[in-house]
Image (cartoon, rainbow, N blue to C red):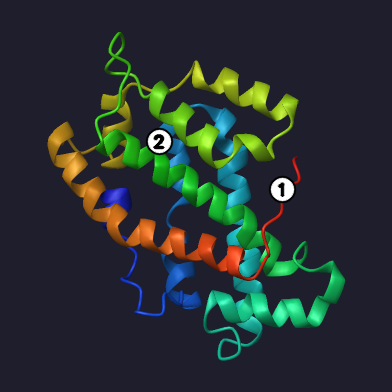
Amino acid sequence: MALLMENQFRELPSDKAVDTKLFLNSVSYLPPFFDCLGSKVFAPIKSDISGNITKIRSVYDKDPVKYATLQQILEAEKEAHGTDWPKVGATLALLWLKRGLRFIQILLQSLADGEKDENHPNLIRVNITKAYDHALKKYHGWLVQKIFKAALLASPYKSDFIKALSKGQEVTEEDCMVCVRQFLVNYTATVDAIYEMYTTLNAELEYTV
């Protein structure tokens, strides 16, 4: 669980404002999560997350005071880009980034909840499928969906996934899930806050790729 526990997300303030610098520092450690899934088919999600983090950081670095929170970035871009917004800049990058983050969240929560295929309890195919269906599938066209369906057949054993998350350390599944639940507390709150922000600002988009 070293991959997650070494870079936990901070607790949000009462107004649920997401500090841009802290957020970027935390999410920058997440792309290797997709290496733990084994299949190279997940590489595009990893690449997409990395690219979107870079795009958001490039905007933030231009004026860290002006863009201190993610909401300030979205509001500034809305004012600057007019009718082109929200399909521009850091707003679009965060739109896709939050979907990748939701995928991770649902996958980990499903594992922590003990959801499994009773016929193949050491596979995490059920958990990955749930995460993909809820977080990404509706935004993918037929071809991309077909590619990811094939990737599910190559999903790793739960034991191998846990070992990869733990950076090769031998940990029990029970100890691993304790860490997962701890990680999910602030992580889920952050992802939920970003989704709520997009709803409030009417910045959500439904197009497929």
Compared to 5, does 111 lie above or below? above
Q: Nearer the viewer, residue 197 or 48?
A: 197
* Residue 28 percent across, percent down from the top left: 47, 60
Compared to 7, does 160 lie above or below? above
Location of mark 1 (residue): 206
Compared to 63, does 204 lie above or below? above
Camera sees residue 149: yes
Q: Relative to residue 148, is residue 124 drawn left or right?
A: left
* Of the image marks 1 and 2, the number of the one nearer the N terminus: 2
* Callout 1: SS: loop
Q: Quadrant of the N terminus?
A: top left
Q: Nearer the viewer, residue 80 or 27?
A: 80
Q: Quadrant of the C terminus?
A: top right
Q: How many marks?
A: 2
Q: Residue furthest right?
A: 83
| Residue shown at 58% from the left, 62% from the top | 53
Callout 1 amino acid: Glu
Q: Nearer the viewer, mark 1 or mark 2?
A: 1
Callout 2 amino acid: Cys
| Residue shown at 63% from the left, 78% from the top | 73
Q: Residues within 10 Å of mark 2 (few under 14, many from 20)?
A: many
| Residue shown at 32% from the left, 62% from the top | 186
Q: Relative to residue 185, is residue 147 drawn left or right?
A: right
Q: Residue furthest bottom?
A: 65
* Residue 74 percent across, percent down from the top left: 65, 75
* Residue 168 percent across, percent down from the top left: 26, 37
CA separation, marks 1 and 2?
29 Å
Location of mark 2 (residue): 36
| Residue shown at 41% from the left, 64% from the top | 190
Q: Nearer the viewer, residue 77 or 47?
A: 77
* Callout 2: SS: helix
Residue 177 falls in which quadrant of the image?
top left
